[in-house]
Amino acid sequence: MAERVKFNAPNPDLLVWKWPSDDLKLGSQVVVNQSQDAVFVKGGRALDVFGPGTHTLETGNLPLLGRLVKWTFGQATPFTAEVWFINKTVRRGLKWGTRGPIQIIDPVYHFPVGVRAFGEWGMRVVDAQSFVNQIVGSQMGADAQLVEEYFAGEIIQRASNMLAEYITKNNISIFKISAYLNELSENIQSQIVPEFERFGIEIVNFNVSRISIPDEDVKKIQDVLGKKMEVEQLSDVNVSSAYAAVKNFEILGDAARNSSNGMGALLGAGIGLGAGVPMGRQMAESASDAGGGDAMQKLQKLKQMLDAGLITENDFDAKKQEILSKI
C-alpha cells in the first residue's frame, strides 16, 4: 500500500513543518495543499520541490534526489529523505517589539533616553528551496517556533539600530519622533528586506506603530530643561557680573565660617557686611535687568518645551505670565 505523505501539523498556521518519518518509497504519494510547497531534503540540502497537488513519487520527478539515491528495486525502492512542508500564505499582523529600552542620546537635548519601539509586520515565503536551505543549515528546522522567533529577533535588532541611526542622522528629538513614524517605518523596511530575501522571504508590510519613553526619563529631562531655562534667562543679562557676584558671596561665606584667619574675624566684626553691600546691589541690578531681557526668545523656548510634552499647559501659562510681567 502506497504511503501518503501530507501536512499533518498540529497547528495549520505553522510556517514550516517536517514530515516525521525519513523513510520513503517510490510509489508513495505526496499531498501538497494550496499555498504550500513540499521540499525533499537529503544531506542538509534542499533538492526537489513539489507544488500544490497530489504527486506520486517516481524516478522521473525526483531528478536531483535521484543523483544521490540508487533505484535498485524499481518502483518499490526504499530511500531516506526528509520532506518539509512550507506554508506560503501571506502572514500579516505579526507583532514585534523591543524587549528592553534602547539607549539613545537625544540629539536636541543631548540627554540619554531609554526608548522602546513596537509595531507589526507581514511576510510570505516565495522561495521554498532557499528557505529550507537556510533553516536546515542553521539548525533551526527541528523547532518551528524557533524559526519564527529567529525572524522576530531579526526585525527587533534591525529596528533598534535603525531607530537610533535615524534619530541621530536627522537630528530629531525623541519627543517628536511620533511625527516621523511613517518615514521611519519605510527606512527600517528597506534595511530588513535584503536579509529576509536571503531566506526566500518577501516582506509584505512593516510599520513602527508606537515608541514609548519611560516616565522616569521624561521627568529627568523636564528637570534638566527647567534648569537650562533658568541658566539661559540669567545669560540674557550680564553673566560675568552676576557670576562674579555669586562667587564673591561664596568667598565671603567661606571666610565667615573660617575663624582661623583675619578675614573671618573682620567679617565677624561686621566689616564683611559692608563689603557685601555693593555685591548684593550688583546682583539685584542683574536680576532687574533679567526682567527686560528678550521676552520673545524666552516665550519661544517655553513653547518648544510645551510642544515636546516636557511641561503642561498650566506650567506654560504660569511661566508665560511671569515672563510678560517683567517686560
Image (tube, rainbow, N blue to C red):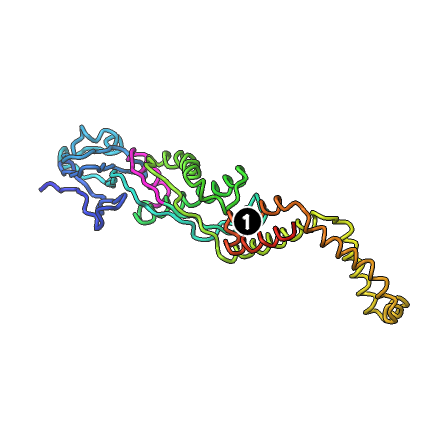
Q: Is residue 263 left or right of residue 106?
A: right
Q: Quadrant of the N terminus?
A: top left
Viewed as shown, does residue 76 lie left or right of 149? Answer: left
Q: Secondary structure at mark 1?
A: helix
The x and y percentages for residue 229 are 62, 51
Pick whichever, 250 or 93, lies toward us.
Answer: 250
**Dividing the picture into quarters, in which one does residue 276 lie?**
bottom right
Residue 54, percent across and down? Answer: 14, 35
| Residue 192 point in image, percent of width and height | 41, 37
Q: Is residue 316 left or right of residue 264?
A: left
* Residue type beneath disc 1: Met
Q: Is residue 289 left or right of residue 41?
A: right
Q: Position of residue 64 (x, y in %)?
A: 26, 30
Q: In the rendered structure, which segment of residues is drawn in magenta?
A: 120-140
Placement of 142 over or under 50, stated as above or below: below
Instruction: Say which of 289 and 253 sits in front.
Output: 289
Q: Residue visible at 50% across and 51% down? A: 309
Q: Residue most toward the right?
A: 262
Q: Which residue is located at x 25 percent, y 45 percent?
A: 17
Q: Nearer the viewer, residue 208 or 125?
A: 208
- Mark 1 Cα shell of 10 Å, populated few (<14), some (14-19), many (≥20): some
Q: Identify which residue, 188 or 48, lies in the foreground.
A: 188
Q: Is residue 2 magenta?
A: no
Snapshot quadrant of residue 5: top left
Give the residue displayed 44% in from the left and 43% down from the top: 159
- The correct choice, above or below, for 114 with respect to 53 in the image is below
What residue is disc 1 on?
305
